[in-house]
Image: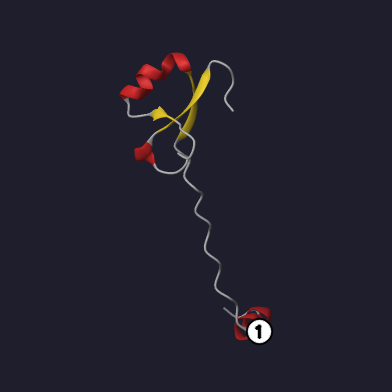
Amino acid sequence: MPEPGFTLIIHPGLGPGSVSEVPESSLGQHYAAGWRLLQEGDVPEPVPEPEPEPVTRAQVAKASKGDK
């Protein structure tokens, strides 16, 4: 929740994380630059990092020997 006198805006063209808290008095400049008010549901879901590939026993044995 933004502080009093501030609001949350989003820039759709900048991708995830393009949310900013700005003073309400600066909305005119932000609108001109393509920003818009953040509405509920506008925040994109974070993309989870992919699971790492499983390590094989052979890779563990090789790593424990110090081989590359």
Label count reads 1
The residue at the point 37 percent across, 23 percent down is 30
The location of residue 68, given as percent across then percent down, is 57, 78
Say few, some or many: other residues with alpha carbon within 10 Å of mark 1 (under 14 / 14 to 19 / 20 or more).
few
- Say which of 45 and 51 sits in front: 45
Residue 26 lies, in percent from the top left, at 42, 16
Residue extending furthest toward the top: 25
Percent x, y of residue 37: 42, 28
Q: Is residue 5 above or below residue 66?
A: above
Which color scheme does this rendered protein use? secondary structure
Amino acid beneath label 1: Ala
Q: Quadrant of residue 56?
A: bottom right
Return the residue found at the far right: 64
Identity of the residue drawn at 38% across and 39% down: 14
Vertical arrangement, residue 64 with respect to residue 51, above or below: below
Q: Is residue 67 left or right of residue 40?
A: right
> In the depicted view, which residue is nearer to us: 59 or 32?
32
User: For numbered disc 1, what is the local secondary structure?
Assistant: helix
Q: Quadrant of the N terminus?
A: top right
Label 1, on which residue? 61
Looking at this view, name the residue that lies furthest to the front. Answer: 40
Q: Residue 34's quadrant in the figure?
A: top left
- Asked if residue 32 lies left or right of residue 53, the reply is left
Q: Position of residue 58 (x, y in %)?
A: 61, 86
Q: Nearer the viewer, residue 32 or 37?
A: 37
Q: In this view, does 36 lie to the left or right of 62?
A: left
| Left or right: where 1 falls relative to 19 | right
Q: Residue at x 58, y 17 (%)?
A: 4
